[in-house]
């Protein structure tokens, strides 16, 4: 029996992504002097992570994961969280028992959270606090040691945590109205473009007032900027918009019975997670946090208008891409 179209789309996305990852790896190793003994394990680790990273964005794949029940799904998810790390450390000689124990702890807690706990506001907020703690305190920089100076592999841990969180909410917990989806529709993209245009004057004024404007002497080329846009769209943007505009904003609307209060609180929380950014200042970086809160406000307005997170994803990714293109 042929696979349903939705499963075929998932498989096609895997094959296309694998080809693009291999091509990107070839280009990167030609630009940067990375020995083959390191490049091969790193590429294999990313290839192993990629299908699971796609999983929460494909409902049919999520349904197949859940077909054996919550415990089985959480077990598969936990095992998949360890696989890329094991490929990397075993093939490069960076294995560490304490790192293994730390990663096992993260995998068990994040994957079995909604197996052991009910879908309740307290459990939901605590889960997001665990997620934020792991990222803010840069736990993965210890678990994934860089093989070479300026070659960070901890992104593998970040990707794993994003998709485990998204799968836990959308599949194991369930009852989430936010549509975790990588590709915006044409109307969603245009809506995101409009909200980006609305955002730019306000963000520019705030940026300038806070003394953050430092123009690059040589702006990044357009090809790299386009690559940055899609990279941000499918990693940072989708995860942050899912959490803040897909989960927290509607929850606060429900709890407070006030869309405006929910929008403001969510935007302030979004700004607060940027306090640790080492950009024009150390911790707490209030200026950059204020700019991020403005971005959160406009992405929240986009969500209010469209009912989904995809327009906010586009506005978010465009903002970061333009920032990286023109500003230091």
Image (cartoon, rainbow, N blue to C red):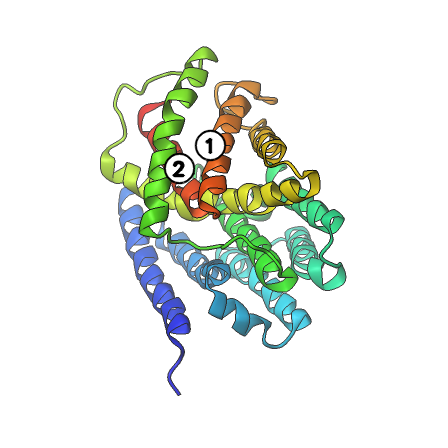
Q: In this rendering, is residue 160 above or below 217?
A: below
Q: Position of residue 124 (x, y in %)?
A: 69, 50
Label count reads 2
Q: Is residue 68 left or right of residue 225?
A: right
> Quadrant of residue 129 in the image?
top right
Residue 298 disc label: 1
Q: In this rendering, is residue 12 above or below 236?
A: below
Say which residue appears at 39% left-offset and 34% top-offset: 195
Residue where numbered disc 2 is placed: 315
User: Is label 1 in contact with label 2 (beta carbons under 8 Å)?
Assistant: yes
Q: For the residues marked 1 and 2, what is the alpha-carbon distance in whole angstroms? A: 8 Å
Residue 209 disc label: none
- Give neighbour class at mark 1: few <14, some 14-19, many 20+ (Cα, 10 Å): many
> Quadrant of residue 40 in the image?
bottom left
As helix, strand or loop, the secondary structure at mark 2 comes to helix
Q: Is residue 188 left or right of residue 53?
A: left
């Amino acid at each position: 029996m042929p696979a349903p179209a939705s499963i075929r789309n998932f498989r096609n996305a895997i094959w296309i992504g694998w080809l693009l990852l291999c091509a990107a790896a070839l280009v990167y190793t030609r630009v940067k002097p990375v020995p083959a003994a390191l490049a091969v394990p790193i590429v294999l680790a990313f290839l192993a992570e990629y299908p699971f990273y796609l999983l929460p964005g494909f409902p049919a794949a999520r349904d197949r994961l859940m077909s054996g029940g919550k415990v089985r799904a959480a077990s598969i998810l936990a095992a998949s969280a360890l696989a890329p790390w094991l490929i990397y450390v075993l093939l490069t000689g960076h294995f560490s028992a304490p790192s293994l124990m730390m990663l096992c702890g993260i995998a068990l807690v994040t994957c079995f959270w909604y197996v052991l706990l009910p879908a309740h506001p307290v459990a939901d907020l605590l889960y997001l606090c665990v997620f934020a703690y792991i990222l803010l305190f840069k736990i993965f920089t210890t678990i994934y040691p860089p093989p070479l100076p300026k070659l960070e592999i901890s992104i593998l841990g970040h990707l794993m945590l994003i998709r485990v969180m998204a799968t836990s909410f959308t599949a194991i917990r369930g009852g989430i109205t936010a549509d975790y989806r990588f590709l915006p529709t044409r109307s969603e993209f245009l809506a995101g473009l409009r909200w980006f245009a609305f955002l730019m004057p306000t963000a520019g004024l705030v940026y300038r007032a806070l003394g953050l404007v430092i123009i690059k002497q040589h702006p990044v080329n357009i090809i790299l900027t386009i690559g940055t846009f899609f990279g941000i769209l499918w990693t940072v943007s989708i995860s942050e918009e899912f959490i803040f505009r897909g989960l927290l904003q509607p929850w606060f609307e429900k709890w407070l019975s006030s869309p405006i209060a929910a929008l403001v609180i969510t935007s302030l929380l979004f700004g607060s997670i940027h306090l640790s950014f080492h950009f024009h200042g150390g911790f707490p970086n209030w200026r950059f946090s204020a700019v991020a809160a403005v971005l959160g406000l406009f992405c929240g307005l986009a969500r209010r208008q469209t009912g989904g997170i995809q327009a906010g994803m586009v506005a978010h990714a465009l903002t970061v891409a333009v920032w990286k293109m023109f500003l230091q």
